[in-house]
Image (spheres, rainbow, N blue to C red):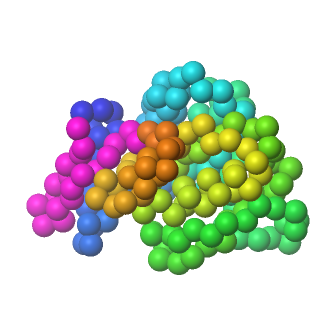
Amino acid sequence: MNFLEEKILADGSIKQGNILKVDNFLNHQIDIDIMRQIAYEFKRRFKGEEVTKILTIEASGIAIAVLLADLYDVPVVFAKKGETANCTDDKYMSQAYSFTHKKMNSVFVSKPYMLADDKVLIVDDFLADGQAMSALIDIVHQAGATVVGCGVAIEKGVQEGGKKLRSQGYHVESIAIVEEMDYEKGTVSFRK
């Protein structure tokens, strides 16, 4: 059992509908020690890959991305989910259905921040059906850049996102893959 699986068992909880709640350390309140360990683990798992940018989607992936970018000494770019008054029309856009929020989001990255010669490591907190990760991959491809890997803190192994991305040839690394959850018993099991 690794550090993240141990943390999930110690501090995570399962809500009705088999929702894994880890907002007390991962995606609402942030345990910086866990984030640091996640960043180091991704750096280890993607050893040998040349990385020029870390890409994530707002908001929960940003903490992981920043600590990982510090290890690589490269910029972080995060895809925005909503347009603001200072947005330009010069952007790469894609669509991602949010499993958590149950809605479709238009996500974008301004063109100056994703270049054709970039080698991009994509990271996020969760991987369920793969919508957010697929949208980020689409944005990288629109820019003509290269996806060197996809790092996920927690993958929901019973959903198809990880399987789909791996079958498309992407190097996907998930620190914890939840194989099964039982709300009634309050148990979580992980893929070996």
Task: State whether residue 16 appears in this view.
Answer: yes
From which residue to which does the magenta span run? 174-192
Magenta span includes 184: yes
Magenta span includes 112: no
* Residue 150 picture location, percent across and down: 53, 43
Question: Between 31 and 168, which is closer to the camera in this rendering?
Answer: 168
Q: Quadrant of residue 54?
A: top right
Residue pictured at 71% horizontal, 47% vertical: 77
Task: State whether residue 40 appears in this view.
Answer: no
Quarter that holds the N terminus:
top left
Q: Is residue 17 left or right of residue 167?
A: left
Furthest residue to the bottom? Answer: 103
* Residue 23 picture location, percent across and down: 42, 56
Question: Between 36 and 102, which is closer to the camera in this rendering?
Answer: 102
* Residue 122 picture location, percent across and down: 59, 45
Quarter that holds the C terminus:
top left
Furthest residue to the left? Answer: 185
Residue pictured at 59% horizontal, 34% vertical: 68
**48 over 171 or under it: above or below:** above
Residue pictured at 76% horizontal, 48% vertical: 144
Question: Between 10 and 176, which is closer to the camera in this rendering?
Answer: 176
